[in-house]
Image: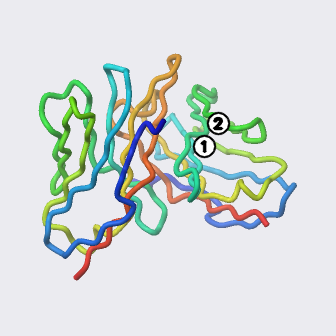
Amino acid sequence: AQKITQTQPGMFVQEKEAVTLDCTYDTSDPSYGLFWYKQPSSGEMIFLIYQGSYDQQNATEGRYSLNFQKARKSANLVISASQLGDSAMYFCAMREVNFGNEKLTFGTGTRLTIIP
Amino acid sequence: KAGVTQTPRYLIKTRGQQVTLSCSPISGHRSVSWYQQTPGQGLQFLFEYFSETQRNKGNFPGRFSGRQFSNSRSEMNVSTLELGDSALYLCASSLSPGLVASGELFFGEGSRLTVL
């Protein structure tokens, strides 16, 4: 079963509009972390935002915010006022702890294209 | 400060050969982890090193190995290459072990390996 599900393989959004990238997750661990990374064509994974499972408030970082709905196991990324430079692959990821070992599990990603 | 540096950026090998990839973490970072990214399997965790010791390991065959040196630089080696090993190999560094304590995981631009 998929631990992280990103149902939007690709999205096209008009510049300056807000965009929501969907992410749902599956875990029975009460303590977990959720992340969003941006991967431009250069290949580098750029950390955008983090949400801990016990955080009471939704995380925000500049134009990025994470819409965390714990009961629905949803952690959508919202980008406000999109820019051309936002065109990239976006990955949702979850911290997993198995037998004391931590690792990140990534979703399959969403390719976001901003249209001028 | 300089980011995570991976070399080589691109390389082509043939089946049966072996390859060594290098990763220099951000200065002061002592934890290095490796990921494989393919179109079919997405991003998958390979292993993590801290203080020259492997701490975590993903589900990859023994052909995939790594090591870390006293200066925190890390190498990964793939022996007896197969066509399916063609991928982008990403290295990430962080200050402390436990990959994902706060999202402070910084990625390099990757080494793109093509196996013919």
Q: Which mark is residue B73?
A: 1
Could you tell whether B25 is left or right of A61 in the image? right
Mark 1 belongs to chain:
B
Secondary structure under badge 2? strand
Q: What amino acid is found at the position of numbered circle 1 in the picture?
A: Arg
From the viewer's perspective, is residue A92 above or below residue B57? below
Residue beneath label 2, please? Answer: B68
Number of residues whose C-alpha sits closer than 10 Å to that of mark 1, classed few (under 14), some (14–19) or many (20 or more)? many
Q: What amino acid is found at the position of numbered circle 2 in the picture?
A: Gln
Could you tell me which residue is drawn at 69 percent across and 45 percent down? B76
Mark 2 belongs to chain:
B
From the viewer's perspective, is residue B42 above or below residue B60? below
Q: Provide residue A97's location: percent of width, then percent of height.
A: 46, 24
Report the number of numbered marks.
2
- Residue with the most extreme top position: A99
Number of residues whose C-alpha sits closer than 10 Å to that of mark 2, classed few (under 14), some (14–19) or many (20 or more)? many
Question: Are circles 1 and 2 on residues that touch, CB within 8 Å?
Answer: yes
Q: Provide residue A8's location: percent of width, then percent of height.
A: 35, 58
- Residue with the most extreme bottom position: A116
